[in-house]
Amino acid sequence: MFENLSDRLSGVFDRLTKQGALSEDDVKTALREVRVALLEADVSLPVARDFVKAVQEKATGQAVTKSITPGQQVVKIVHDELVRTLSGDDDPGKLKIDSAPAPILMVGLQGSGKTTTTAKLAKRLKEKEGKRVLMASLDVNRPAAMEQLQILGLQIGVDTLPIVKGEDPVAIAKRAKTQASLGGYDVYMLDTAGRLHIDQELIAQAAAVRDVANPRETLLVVDGLTGQDAVNVATEFDDKIGVTGVVLTRMDGDGRGGAALSMRAVTGKPIRFVGLGEKMDALETFEPDRVAGRILGMGDIVALVEKAQETIEAEQAERMMKRFQKGQFNMNDLKMQLEQMMKMGGMESIMGMMPGMGKMAKQAAEAGFDDKVLRQQVALINSMTKKERANPQILQASRKKRIAAGAGMDVSDLNKLLKMQRQMSDMMKKLGKMGKGGMLKQAMKGMFGKGGMPAGMDPSQMDPAALEQAAKQMGASMPGGKLPGLGGMGGLPGGLSGFGKKK
């Protein structure tokens, strides 16, 4: 999300922060580049113009140009303005689904990912908010649209309204309302039909369903890849039907992200969720301050903490930390960390969330270090015996040949893996002792609250600042800024650019 924009802006701000003092001309030159970067990211011209004007007014004052760190001051002003542009004046708060059964109307054009998003949101409401959800497909036009929602419902364990052929959308909406009331559901979701473009029939059908259901939320699903067209679609749907929020899909493949930056400013409607992939859990709430941080290459440490909390067991984390502090880091530990990384979205996802690691993620991708490498490393470890995993130092030539052959890899690949395990073992020992209370303890504290253990899933209990500080210290203490491991949050192996490549 926002890769191109992030790259352009980080280049501008790198130059600014390296300068000791800033003149007003320096700031204006930098902001001209910011404006070009925004326009190239498909941000609408009025939004880009207003954004740069607002930043310029705040950044050319005496307080900034004469401050001790003027470059960082400008970055802070840009960050705050990004948050304001993305969030608007009013906080939409949580979805209004307090009175049961609460109807949610899903609208949008055909091909925007509406049906998949309906299922993703239903899964999220069920698992994260404990809601009983009923899904109903009102799409009588697209072949197998109803069956598609039914299959997704089975996959995620959410009920769908039984299909009755020949019913029109309004009749289906009435039946869904009745079943949701009688069945004791908290929420019922109505997945309406789409068209390739906005026409009279589409609007009339959606308006008729809206009048019957009287939805608590009307969520418009738009394809983020369509850029400014997504903003135009949102404006038109809101004028004709009334929209309470937007879901931007396909944001995982978007190198521009202009739709997200323009949406709130142009339509006044909040972006509630973003779709970041095909998997059923690839739907995230849209957090403006965290998105702004990612755009500016500051990482998203809170998202990293949340992913860690979702995938790491408390007792397992405690055991791992005790072992790491003693420098006990064998192949079983390495395998656990590699699998942890894959669960948390893979190498690029994790590094993209860490402060200052965005560029390193790009370098790793260019060097051919991707999630396929993680799977190859796990395959090598699986090819070892229990004794070999616990004591990798016993691996001699004959054993290495057998292990490499078993995983379909070269002995040189195994040697790189063994070297990484030794480096990480040494690093864990150092991190366990370094600094006040040890960096590992700081990292765990950040992940699991002040007691070092999970403080529930409430983000207010986390201490991202402690974790961010530990991450920065670890990055600074590595040769060449490489970060071989981060406690129980999944290791970030360095120096493996040649792994798995056939010579």
Image (cartoon, rainbow, N blue to C red):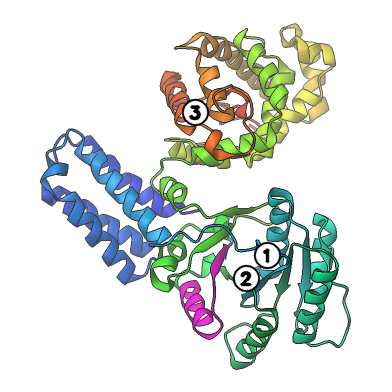
Disc number lying in front (2 or 3):
2
Q: Give the Cα separation between the discs numbered 2 and 1.
A: 9 Å
Give percent across and percent down for residue 29: 18, 53
Name, please, the residue furthest toward the bottom.
Answer: 200
Does the residue at mark 2 contact the one at mark 1 (Cβ under 8 Å)?
A: yes
Q: Give the Cα separation between the discs numbered 3 and 1.
A: 38 Å
- Residue under the point 62% across and 34% down: 308
Residue range in magenta is 229-249
Residue 235 falls within the magenta-colored stretch: yes
Q: Amino acid at mark 3?
A: Leu
Q: Amino acid at mark 1?
A: Ser
Q: Amino acid at mark 2?
A: Arg
Residue 438, can we see it?
yes
* 73 lies above or below 30: above
Residue 144, can we see it?
no
Give percent across and percent down for residue 30: 22, 51
Task: Give left or right: position of 332 versus 448.
Answer: right
Residue 238 falls within the magenta-colored stretch: yes
Of pointers 2 and 1, the one earlier in the residue sequence: 1
| Element on which disc 3 rests | helix
Of pointers 2 and 3, the one earlier in the residue sequence: 2
- Residue under the point 59% across and 90% down: 199
Of pointers 3 and 1, the one earlier in the residue sequence: 1
- Binning the other alpha carbons within 10 Å of mark 1 as few (below 14), some (14 to 19) or many (20 upward) gives few
Q: Give the Cα separation between the discs numbered 2 and 3.
A: 38 Å
| Element on which disc 2 rests | loop
For label 3, the residue is 467
For label 1, the residue is 99
Give percent across and percent down for residue 196: 62, 82
- Give the quadrant of residue 448: top right
For label 2, the residue is 216
